[in-house]
Image (tube, rainbow, N blue to C red):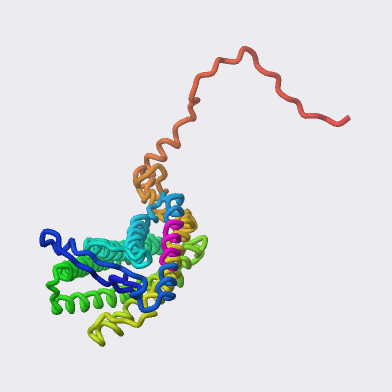
Amino acid sequence: MAPRRSSGGSSSSSSYYSDDNPWSQEIQFSLDAVRSKSLFIAGFAFDVLTILALIIFLVWACIIPNGRGQLKGVLSALFAYLTAMICILIYEIFFLADATVTMYYVIDLMLNELFFLLAGCLLFFVFYNLIHSLLDRLTDSGKPYAVVAVVHWVLLGLVSLLSLATFALFVAVEVQFVQENYNSSLGNHYFKMESARGIIWWILSLEIVAWFIFIAVKAGSHRFTSKLPVFSLIVGSVSWMALNMMYAVIYIRYTLETNTSIAPKYLNTVESVCQFFFVVGIFGGILLACMKWRNVDDRPDKHGPEQYPAGTGPYQSYQHYQQQYPPQAQQYYQQQPYQQPYSQPPPQQPLPQAQPHQDK
């Protein structure tokens, strides 16, 4: 996920303090202050397209049946990503409208950072949940892959803690910026932690792609009626990996190597364009797989033999039946004459017997 993005813009300030409150300082945004108006407008347009795509995906997710829990976390991830994009769009509108705002606009940037990080953690949860469901389909007992779920949930917990620490540092840096008490040391710590988070997310997203490829290779027709859900998830996971790789490369090139977040003027536009296509790939792949999930679970062989184990259930095996009823008891019942299950009235008169037909 992206940290705070200015889309190449800057702002000029005409400040005054009300009741010595630095948050009441006014900031003047202007499109004339951006380094490239055309690139800024192009990035803004693709951010709008991303929001429209997320709204469409949100509606699509609401009409997909969730009978098997395959949509768990998807709606929350969509809502979080949509909220983050709306926050960054509001920030960009300040430049287009030449708005004069107070320093409270920083809260919008904090919300943008919070919901981007939340959306990322939820996407990890969604992919992990789908991986576990598919791996469970590959085996009757599920035991060979039980450790995978444990490792994934531990990783998700660590990712969540790292994201929370990153957000806390971001808030601290922004508050110092507003109070004009900026600490460069704290800012450097934030940039390093944000870069580390981006690189770790990239590595973990590579592992997700590897799992879906493994499932696609190992799964056969006896397990899945169709591999379309798996291939859709490969597209979604590759898009998720590509999005994280893009930010990891940016962090390495413009944060870790130069120890500064200053980037070329075209970079934010490239981010917006790539983000649009990656978001379409991520959520399009996930939702298509969820819509076709019946092709994964609607197979009679999964858990079929284990529904009624030997010795239990309405139908017992012949061997188990012999153990309950030894041959002596069976012979006793076989020697008994057949008894009518109900009484019949005696015949009134003998019935005439049929005579064989003789040819004349």
* Residue 190 position by quadrant: bottom left
In the image, 97 versus 80, the foreground residue is 97
Residue 199: image location, x then y, percent: 28, 77
Up/down of 48 relative to 322, above or below? below
Side of 68 where 29 appears, left or right? left
In the image, 191 versus 325, the foreground residue is 191
Q: Is residue 197 part of the magenta span, yes or no?
A: no
Q: Residue furthest right?
A: 360
Residue 357: image location, x then y, percent: 80, 29
Q: Residue furthest bottom?
A: 257
Q: Is residue 50 part of the magenta span, yes or no?
A: yes
How many numbered callouts? Answer: 0
Q: Can see residue 128?
A: no
Residue 322: image location, x then y, percent: 38, 46
Residue 148: image location, x then y, percent: 30, 67
* Residue 85 position by quadrant: bottom left
Magenta-colored span: 46-57
Identify the residue at horizontal 35%, vertical 56% (top origin): 79
Q: Quadrant of the N terminus?
A: bottom left
Q: Quadrant of the C terminus?
A: top right
Identify the residue at horizontal 33%, vertical 75% (top origin): 33
In the image, 287 versus 332, the foreground residue is 287
Q: Main secondary structure of the magenta part?
A: helix
Identify the residue at horizontal 17%, vertical 62% (top origin): 23
Side of 287 where 83 appears, left or right? left
Q: Can see residue 355?
A: yes
Side of 24 where 242 appears, left or right? right
* Residue 272 position by quadrant: bottom left
Identify the residue at horizontal 26%, vertical 87% (top origin): 257
In the image, 320 versus 172, the foreground residue is 172
